[in-house]
């Protein structure tokens, strides 16, 4: 009797793991069917050659280690942890420890690439300091290791994530990049979210905004410093960067403006911020031409900061 009970206990212990293994096998089959039935028609409509599609996705399996996945048949839940740094606590994102290497690296590269950056600023209107800051934060000036297979990441998230349509669009864009010969399959390395190259562009943003600045016929954001920096500048220009205008202003925020109004999803017209009592530390009024545009409060000291703390408002 004891032997039977012990055997039953062992079987029950292994049952969840066995079921999970079977679920994953079934999910992989559904995944391959999804690529064929959903992604291929969209890629074909965008002009992607069938041979490119097959080569790019041959042997690609689901990556179960990625965050924010929703397995087939499961319900989406709110993530317990936010993985995108810019949506975490501002204090961490703008900590001195985090920014020290970026500042030092930016200064050294300003000297090394000064002439190039001046040419880019003349063409895009975006100052060198902004371009270098983005380059440094996104990939450590190109030195950061980007270990993941972009096609696998995008395909996994297109199949089982809370933003399936977005990632399906990005997967098709990645296939377009390969089809047009803009990159080799081996170059398609990404972050956990599928962002590519030194400026960490999503594939659709690469297609829309990356530029060939060194004149070699390729928009190479993986190996070309000139293309990387110019693509960052062009991206901001395409999104409305105003030449001669800084990224934001240091402002004083009254007690009546709640810290809950801080963040990239809390935009209001500059005129509305001014009416609420937000004023520039410089004492100068906000420019009349910007009063109808959106502004966003950014509080590097965090949501618990006192109104006397340094706060900045960004205009996009």
Image (cartoon, rainbow, N blue to C red):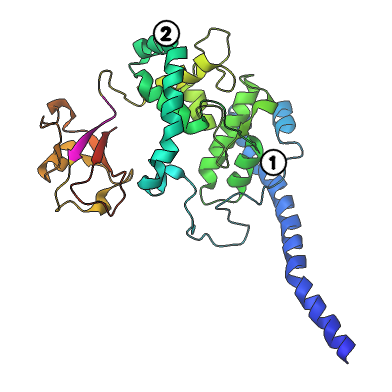
Residue 47 in view, yes or no? no
Q: Secondary structure at mark 1?
A: helix
Q: Which residues are magenta?
A: 246-251
Viewer-side residue, 145 vs 296:
145
Viewer-side residue, 184 vs 95:
95
Quadrant (top left, top right, bottom left, bottom right) of the N terminus: bottom right
Q: Secondary structure at mark 2?
A: helix
Viewer-side residue, 311 vs 185:
311
Secondary structure character of the magenta stretch overall:
strand
> In the picture, residue 107 is in which quadrant?
top left
x, y percent for residue 108: 45, 19
x, y percent for residue 112: 47, 13
Determine if the magenta segment contains residue 247: yes
Q: Residue furthest bottom?
A: 1
Viewer-side residue, 133 vs 80:
133
Q: Which mark is residue 36?
A: 1
How many marks do you count on the picture? 2
Residue depicted at 63% across the width and 39% down the height: 39
Q: Would you call the spot at circle 1 few (<14 residues within 10 Å), some (14-19), or many (20 or more)? A: some
Are dots 1 and 2 in contact, CB under 8 Å?
A: no
Residue depicted at 54% across the width and 30% down the height: 203
Q: Identify residue for label 2.
A: 115
x, y percent for residue 45: 59, 30
């Amino acid at each position: 009797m004891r032997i039977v009970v012990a055997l039953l206990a062992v079987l029950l212990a292994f049952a969840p793991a066995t079921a999970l293994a079977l679920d994953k096998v079934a999910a992989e089959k559904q995944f391959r069917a999804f690529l064929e039935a959903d992604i291929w028609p969209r890629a074909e409509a965008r002009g992607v050659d069938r041979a490119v599609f097959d080569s790019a996705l041959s042997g690609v399996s689901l990556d179960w280690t990625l965050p924010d996945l929703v397995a087939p048949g499961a319900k989406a839940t709110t993530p317990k942890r936010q993985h995108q740094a810019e949506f975490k606590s501002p204090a961490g994102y703008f900590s001195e420890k985090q920014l020290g290497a970026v500042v030092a690296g930016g200064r050294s590269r300003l000297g090394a690439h000064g002439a190039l950056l001046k040419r880019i600023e003349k063409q895009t209107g975006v100052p060198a300091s902004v371009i270098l800051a983005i380059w440094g934060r996104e990939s450590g000036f190109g030195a950061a290791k980007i270990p993941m297979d972009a096609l696998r990441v995008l395909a996994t998230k297109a199949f089982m994530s809370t933003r399936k349509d977005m990632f399906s669009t990005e997967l098709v864009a990645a296939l377009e990049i390969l089809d047009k010969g803009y990159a080799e399959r081996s170059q398609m390395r990404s972050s956990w979210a599928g962002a590519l190259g030194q400026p960490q562009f999503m594939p659709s943003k690469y297609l829309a905004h990356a530029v060939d600045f060194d004149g070699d016929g390729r928009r190479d954001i993986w190996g070309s410093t000139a293309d990387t920096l110019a693509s960052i500048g062009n991206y901001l220009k395409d999104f409305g960067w105003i030449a001669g205008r800084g990224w934001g202003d240091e402002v004083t925020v009254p007690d009546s403006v709640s810290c809950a109004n801080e963040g990239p999803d809390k935009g209001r017209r500059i005129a509305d911020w001014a009416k609420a009592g937000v004023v520039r530390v410089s004492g100068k009024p906000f420019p009349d031409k910007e009063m109808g545009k959106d502004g966003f409060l950014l509080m590097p000291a965090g949501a618990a900061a006192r109104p006397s703390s340094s706060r900045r408002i960004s205009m996009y």
